[in-house]
Every structure is written in structure tokens, then in C-alpha cells.
Image: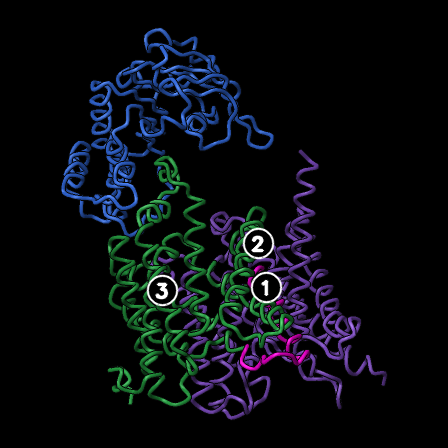
Amino acid sequence: MDEFLILSLPPMVIASLAAVACALPGNFLVLSRRAMLGDAMSHVVLPGIVVAFLLTGSGNGWVMGAGALAAAGLSALLIEVVTRRARMEPGAAMAVVFTAMFALGVVLLEMTGTSGIHLDVEHALYGNLETLIWLPGPPPELARLALIAAGLALALRLVWRPLVLATFDPVFAQTMGIPVAWLRAGLTAATALAAVAAFQAVGSILTISMLICPAAAARLLTTRLPMQVAVSLGFAVASAVLGYVLAGYAPLWLGLPYTVSASGMIATVSGLMLVGAALTASHRARARL
Amino acid sequence: MILSALLLQAGYNAALVSLGAALLGAAAGAAGAFLTLRRRALMSDAMAHATLPGIGLAFLAMVALGGDGRFLPGLMLGAGLTAAAGLWAVQRLSRQLAEDAATGAVLATFYGAGIVILTLIQGLGVGRPAGLETVLLGSTAGMLRADALVIGFGGAAVVAALWVLRRPLAMVAFDPIHARLMGINPRRMDAALMALVLAVVLVGLNVTGLILIVALLVTPAVTARLWATTVSGTATLSAALGAACGYGGAAISAGIPDLPTGPVIVLLAAGAFALTLMIRGHADG
Amino acid sequence: MSQIPLDVRDLTLRYGDVLALDGATAHFPKASMTAIVGPNGAGKSSFLKSVLGLEAASGEVRAFGGPVADAMARIAYVPQRAAVDWSFPVRVIDVVLMGFYRQTGLLGRIDRRFQAKAMACLARVGMQDFARRQIGALSGGQQQRVFLARALAQGAELYLLDEPFAGVDAATESAIITVLKGLQAEGATIIAVHHDLSTVADYFDRVLLLNRHTIAEGSVAEIFTRDALARAYGPSLMLAAE
């Protein structure tokens, strides 16, 4: 097979799928002012993975994913409890919970000697996109992310109408008999699922970035929600592909014989797209006046 | 071993680390009290992550100028500059987006750019980049007397500035409109508060690293808030809690091999918060 | 005439495409007590905020013969319902002490003298027994009285109040009106946005009828007429009042 198909296409597709899986719930997080939930979720994945590994001794992706999901669910619950019982701004509650969980993960990692052998913190932060090559077959992350992205898209399609209502006007939605609390919990679960799936493949930076940047950029440029979601998916895929290419080839164009972090570059590109969207939007607003 | 570390008997370096961490905890606790009262807890997270590209760029700049790149004040200057840029970006984006989305976007983008620069440095193979990534999680193992002095003086300066500004800071946090009518400039006060938080973040990079410094700012502060009924009470208690966790965490990690300092400090603070929540939390809600 | 507490000319405020104030003009003589009355969306709150410089309105506003910015120390403002975090760790007395900031500054000691003055302000609104309570532990009416006490602490000569009686209990309403009348007797000038037309004549001696621009202003007796109200509110109010 062609070198591109073996080395570059699989990670590029995986990055795109991860971006799509995150951007879908990201649209609703941004609308309901819970954007930082993505930050919290991507940090609490670490202790889940470590505990799952310690309990089962298995490095299997599905086992670790289940552990991560459990940790994400637990911390979502803790954030709710802390917000209510301490009557605290949600941001502060998130900061308390995710730092505690992350610290626990690091301590477990260091104390059990797991670090360096199977897991390490930096790996978890940057991801290992570049190693997901087609050798000998497709990397398992490919199928897993494709499945999860498709599942999230389907779920979103199913609950679209009540979710839009509940996001826009929760009180009205409640009076219409829409289970607002369940939808909120569902969005949290979808965020956790996307964060866990993406995290294993691409690391936590890319997860935070894809949960927020494409949706925020699309929100600035569109006035209708279906359009916003569509544009955000476009931004997500575009930044994944463009970021991957830039990370792999830009140093070569500069005459440097190595590559830079693809996850970091994708996050940077999506941030630059948001900046572009913000400038375009304010330019348009000025033109209207 | 832990006991002797707690009593500063476990050797010069362990004592140095314990005192440094205690001073950092006090400064972070005091600054965090005002930060959380202003409801900007996660702004510190964005700020901390935005230091990373600055650290990388400062390293590259120092190497280009012929140094070894690990000169701490230089790295802190770079970190401060990009963190300030990140703060500016959050404010600018907040004009068009909800503040939480702006904060998250800036955090992820600057952090991503930082990682790109770090991998670039690794690829270049210049200077002595090994250990540059300790800024992520902090490292107290090699703390020098000079580092402890930086933390001590930095922390004391932050606490002193907060003490001087405590009234206008509290008034802006409580009722910005009234503060403005009383002749206080809320924007200037917010800028001052952010500068003080930034100072804590920069000093804390060595101890807890940029991912966990937010815990030192937020967790003692929200714990104190559940006990105290006044602003000065909250700030004082928060500083005391931060100092105790910093000191205790450093001592415990000195006593047990492989135990990293920053995460232990964070877990102690989280434990104090959990205990407080059980005693003082609101049952309803 | 140059010492008139507040003189407003041609105040205009625009929110995007919406004109909130359209050339409102009014003057408020010393020791008068004026109700700002008008239908919903007439720009009554915007009028107060623009006067204080909290909104970027155009027009000329002069307080005590000079620009408002120079007279801020002589002006106190009580918002409709302060948009504050009610779980904030301040006690009632701390809120009132904030009213002394111009005197205490950054570092001036808050000694017994200030504590006693703050207690006196609280006593004036009937809240002296609540001084050590956390602000969030009070009812809405009590909170409103504390914010009035904070304004009293400022020792102002011109008081701007945005719907001080909205949503408060009867005890609070009578406490507030007693305080305001007392301030007027001491020579202070009171301007309040007011909703309840039935109490205007009892509480106030002047009226500013506002509907984005000034419909009429003057003493209650000459202005508070069916004809002027109809011009401000439209004829539907008459039907409702009948």
C-alpha cells in the first residue's frame, strides 16, 4: 500500500472522527454555558484509566474506556453535588473536582509503578495520534471512534427537538413535559463518552479543543441551530485534517527533519479558526450598523 | 519519616520544599479567595495552561541567544507574557461568546500551541530541554534555595498587595455597580486581581505544575467560604488552609518515595473540602 | 440656580436599534421629592443609569452645577434589586460599611466611629437587630432596606432610587418612605422611579412623566392629571383605573 494510506490516512481519519464525536455534544455545551465541562471531563479520564488497569491488569482499550467512563460519570455526579451542597458557581465546583481526580490519577500512577510501563501522564495529555498506523490492520481506535461518533449522531437526531427546546428555555420545556433533567444528564453522558473515546486516541488537549472551538466558531457565524451544527462539524474535520498535515509537513517545508505534535497542532488550528470566525463576525456586525 | 519531615528534621532540601510549598499555599489561598468571590475560578485554569507556549518560546529565545535555555526567570517571563496574552484573548472573545466558552477555547488553543512548541524543541535537540515538561506537573525534587526565595518573596508580595486592595476587591466582587459609583474602577481592580493570580500561577509552576495550580487557588477558597461570614475571614482562612496543605503535602511526599508533591497537596486540600462539605454543606437543593 | 442638584437636558440613549431615551429633559430642585412615572419600557431605569454614567447616553447632565462625575461623592443610588451574589460572605454591617469607602479608602481604619455610624444607618431603616446576619439570610424587603442604609452611609445630598417599593412588604415600604421623607426634611433631594400610581400623591411632591421623552414635569397637583397621564400611558390606563 501507499505510504500515505498506511501512515497518514488512519490517524487523519481517527482525528476527524474524534473531532466529530466531540463537536456534536460541544454545540449544546456551548449553548447551555457548560463549555468547561469538557475541560473537567478530559482531566478525570486519567484516574479512571489507571484504576481500570490496576483492577484488571488489562491494557485493552474497551476495559480502560469503561474505567474512564465510570470516572467521568462519578465526577459529573460529584460536580452536581458540590454545586448544590456548597451553593457554588459551577466553574469552581468543576475546578475542585477535576483537580482532585487528576491528582489522584497521578498519585496512583506514580505509587503503583504503572508509570513508564503502560501509561504516562504526558502521553495522556498529548495523545499518540502519530502511532495509529495501518499495521498490520486498521488500528482498533478507528472502529471504536467510528462507532461512537455514529452513535452520538444518531442519539442527537433522536432527541433533537426536545434537546433544542430544553437548551433554549428549560423552564418552558419543563412545562411542556420534556424531561429536562434527563436531557441534561444525557448531554453530560454524551460529553463523557466523546471525551473518553477521543482521549484514548488523541489525548486531552484535543478533546477540550474539539468540544469547544468548532461549536463556538460556528455559533458566531450562523443564526440557525441546524446550520450551526453542520458548520461546526465542517470546522472540526477541517482542523483535524489541516492540523495533521501541518504537524507532519510544515517542519519539513522549513527544512527541519522531524514532525511536531499533531494533537497540539490540531488544537492550535481550531483555535485560529475560532479567531477567524470572531473577526469575521465582528466585521459583519460593524457592516450592519 | 513523614513525622520528621513535618518537623523540618528530614534534611535541608525537604525543609526548603515544605516552607516553599507552605508560602505558595498561603499566597494562592488568599488570591483564590478573591478570585472565587469574583466568580472567575476557571479563568486561572486558562491562565495556567496559557503559560506553556511562553515557556517554550522563552526556552528557544534563550537558546538562540546562546544560553542553555533553563534560566528560570527567563522562562517565567515568557510564561507571564503568553498567559497575559491568553487573558486578553479571553476578554476579547467574551465580547462575542459566553465567558466559559471563551475560557475553554483559549485554554485548549494556547495549550495546544505550547505542546507543538515543546515537540519542536525536542526535535531541534538544542539546549537542555530535558525536564522542561516538569512544568506540567511540577517538580519539587530539585528545588534550590533560590527557588524557595522566589516563592517566598513572590508569595509575600502577593499577600501584601491583596491586603492593601482588600476593600475595593471585595466591593467590586460584591456589587460592581456600587463600587463604580464609589469611585472604584472595576476594570482596573479586575486587572490587578488577575495580575496577582498570574503571579501565583507563575510561582506555582515549580511546585504543582500548570495543570494542578488551579486547585491551590480554588479548593482552599471554596472550603473557607463554607466556614467564614466575612471577606477577610474567607481570605485569611483560605490562606491558612492553603499553607497547611502545602506544608503537609510537601512533608508527606518527602517521606514516601515516588510520591509527587503537587498532587498530594491537591488531594489534602480536596480532603479538607470534602470534610467541610459534610459538616457545613446545605442539605437541601 | 447653578447649585440645582440635578439638571438633565436632551438625554438620549440607544440600545442597538432601540431608542430607550429620546431627548428626555428634566430638572430637580433642592429638597424636592420626585417620582419618575411612566409605562413599561418608558426608559425610567435607563434615565437613572444614564444620569449616573452607567449607560453611555448623549445629552447634558449637570449635578450641583457641574459635571456628574465631579459630584459622585454627593450622589447615592439604590438599584431596583441589586444583582449581587446573595451567598457572598458579607454581613449586613459590612454592606453598610461599604458606603463609607470614600472616607476610609484603601487602608483607613474602620474604627468604632464608623461601626457606630453604620449602626445608626441601620437603625434608621429599622434593621439594627440584623447587623450580624449574613446578607443572604434576609428577606427581599430587608435586603432592600440594607441597600438603602448603605446609601445613607454615603451621606449623599441627592438620592436616586429605582423602584424602591417593588416587591417589598408593607413594613419595608413604610420604613423606606419614612426615611426618604426624613432625608428630604434634612435638605436632600430624592428621585425615585415609581410604579404605583395610587401612592404618588401621598409619597411625592413632584412628578416626572416619562415616555422616552419628557411628557410633563412639575408638582403633583399640576402634573398628575388625567390628561397628562393619558398622554404618557395612552387611553387604556384610564379604563383600567376607572
Report, in whole angstroms, how far the alpha carbon at label 3 lies from the one at label 1: 26 Å
Q: Report the residue marked by disc 1.
A: B110
**Residue B201, percent across and down?**
44, 65
Q: Residue furthest right?
A: A2
Q: Secondary structure at mark 1?
A: helix
User: Of marks 3 and 1, which one's residue comes earlier in the chain?
Assistant: 1
**Outermost residue, top side:** C222
| Residue B154 spot, x, y in % from top left | 38, 64
Q: Is residue A186 visible?
A: no
The residue shown at (19%, 38%) is: C118
| Chain letter belonging to callout 1 | B
Q: Is residue B118 magenta?
A: yes
Residue beneath the point at 22% across and 21% down: C181
B125 versus A88 height, above or below? below
Q: CA distance from mark 2 to mark 3?
A: 26 Å
- Judged left or right of residue C105, residue B36 is right
Look at the numbered discs 1 and 2 and tell me whether their residues touch, using CB distance below 8 Å. Answer: yes
User: Which chain wears purple?
Assistant: A
Identify the residue position indicated by label 3 in the image: B155
What residue does disc 2 label?
B89
Specify few, some or many for label 3: CA neighbours under 10 Å numbering under 14, 14-19, or 20 or more.
Answer: many
Amino acid type at image mark 1: Phe
Looking at the image, is mark 2 or mark 3 earlier in the sequence? 2
Q: Badge 1: few (under 14), some or many (20 or more) residues near its Cα, within 10 Å? A: many
Which chain is rendered green in the image? B
The one nearer the camera, B251 or A158, is B251
Given residues B274 and B42, the one toward you in this image is B42
Expressed as whole percent of the image width and height from the top left, the position of residue B116 reads 64, 71
Q: Which mark is residue C138?
A: none
Of labels 2 and 3, the one closer to you:
3
Q: Chain of mark 2?
A: B
